Amino acid sequence: MFKQLANDEIETVTVILNGQEIQVPKGTTVAAIALSQGLRSTRTTPISNTKRAPFCMMGVCYDCLMVIDGKANQRACVTYVEQGMQVECQQGTGPSLGDAQ
Amino acid sequence: MKNHYQFLIIGAGPAGLAAAATASKYGISCALLDEQPEPGGQIYRAIESIPEQREKLLGSEYQRGQALVDEFRASAAEYYPETRVWSLNDQKEAGVLHHGKTKMITADQILVASGAMERPVPFPGWTLPGVMQAGAGQILFKSAGVVPSDGVVLAGSGPLLLLLAWQYLHIGVEIKAMLDITPLSNYLTALPKLPKALLAHQYLTKGIAYQIDLKRAGITTKIGVSDLRAEGDGELQSIRFRHFGREQLIKTDVLLTHFGVIPHIWLTQAAGCKHQWDKSQQCWRPEHDDWGNTSIEGVMVAGDGAGIHGARSAEHAGRLVGLQALFALGVLTQAERDSQAMEDRKWMNTDRRIRPFLEAYFAIPKKMLATPDDDTIVCRCEEITSGQIRKAVKEGHEDSNQVKYFTRCGMGACQGRQCANAVAHIVDDAGGQEISAQSHYRGRPPVAPLALGQLADLYEEDAQ
């Protein structure tokens, strides 16, 4: 698993990860937060429903897809946390746009 | 953001930053677009905002990026962070997504400085949560101060693995094992290239210093490792491998692998630039001349996206392309370009002397690149196995693109970024075309995620 090293100088924002409010450092990607919060997997695949987690952390593998603010298939490793952001693990292809509205 | 620039640069790593700083001195209109919120690329990621303590741990090679970023910030080049380039064509038109708005930008000269990505090498269990690339481990530390909490196994081949181990040692992350899959026969093939490499010895002495530090801390690299497997029920629990023929098992919940890096060529592919298989670097790269010109007039490449030479070379190559752009725009004469390029060309060539040695020494064994285990997933997105690809080849699909059409391998969300090379190696190994004769997966726009509504916005703008 992963942990975030202590750092006092960084401002924090509140995000809602899988329904739970957490304080996280500003300027961090959603994928880094998910891993440091102890999530081992962040989605299941649409083909075989197996668990996956961030792999490359630089936007090329598309394995870190999560549902962010209701939108599915967002790359968590290139999305930066924002105040009030809702982040959820994605099941398969995730909710369609219609579901989110 | 304007609709047209004289010089458009894509990517804010060392090559893009150096090119922008160089060219914008001459009063041309110049813009740099980058996906990240801060300049620096992956190598100098978060250099402007990183806490001091973390920066110290990353060492002088990382801190070097600050000067480059400062010079760029002081330049007249326009800078657009958080900007995604989703298409590029041979008319020198770039499709851009900036803060949710889509736009087409044209330019007289375009530099694609897209950098490198980790070479994806499929092995049994590489899709399990807990298995990541070493570069991912480094990005997590640089950008967020996130590190493995219950120990880590590092496996693969190449300088980055050693650097990451050394950094983890200083942070206090437990390194359970360092597994080197470099075949011992590489030592022999690399040996004749060593004398030239000694002319760029700072890399070798650094590597040796890291080894000594690790050894002092009781971390020895296991050499001669093969048959790496990641195992676990739904997530990584242990890894299994052979060490000089003897099977071993280590319990771990994080495995970071590294098999070298390859150019990220999706934009130059989409633009239609000619690419070639680089046998020594074991990857495709765009064809280019000494000034970074590709097969499309006005489209240039520099840095690792042009072929892997590292961050220092990227900086020099970026400045050379900056001068070339000025020459092509008629701002500099050929003689002015050539004389101003002399220093950078000299230092770039000196820096690159290490490369033939590194490429031979860290060459990934062909057997491993061809994913010998038939049950291993090769296409992470469409979940296509090595066995399915071999079967398609046997049935007469003898080129990567044919295998793609037939199996859907490479048609998922990552657009083949993770499987393109592996599929080409498997096709070659299974009796299809030789890898150098195959065409790389055809890349098509959008090469980055774009919502249909965002694409439609383009036409709304036209209509107004």
Image: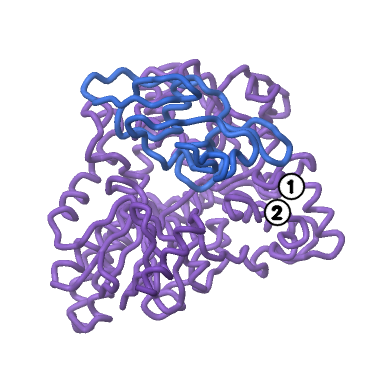
Residue B246 lies, with reference to residue B372, above or below; the image says above
Q: Horizontally, is B57 left or right of B117 in the view?
A: left
- Quadrant housing residue B240: top right
Residue B259 lies, with reference to residue A50, above or below; the image says below
Q: Residue at x 29, y 47 (%)?
A: B40
Q: Amino acid at mark 1?
A: Ile
Q: Nearer the viewer, residue B453 or B361?
A: B453
Q: Residue at x 39, y 74 (%)?
A: B463
Residue B426 lies, with reference to residue A91, above or below; the image says below
Chain painted in purple in the figure: B
Q: Nearer the viewer, residue B67 or A27?
A: A27
Q: Residues within 10 Å of mark 1 (few under 14, many from 20)?
A: some
- The quadrant the C terminus of chain B occupies is bottom left
- Quadrant housing residue B396: bottom right
Asked if one can make out residue B204 in the rendered structure from this viewpoint, the answer is: yes
Q: Residue at x 18, y 73 (%)?
A: B28
Q: Residue at x 74, y 58 (%)?
A: B427
The secondary structure type at the circle numbered 1 is strand
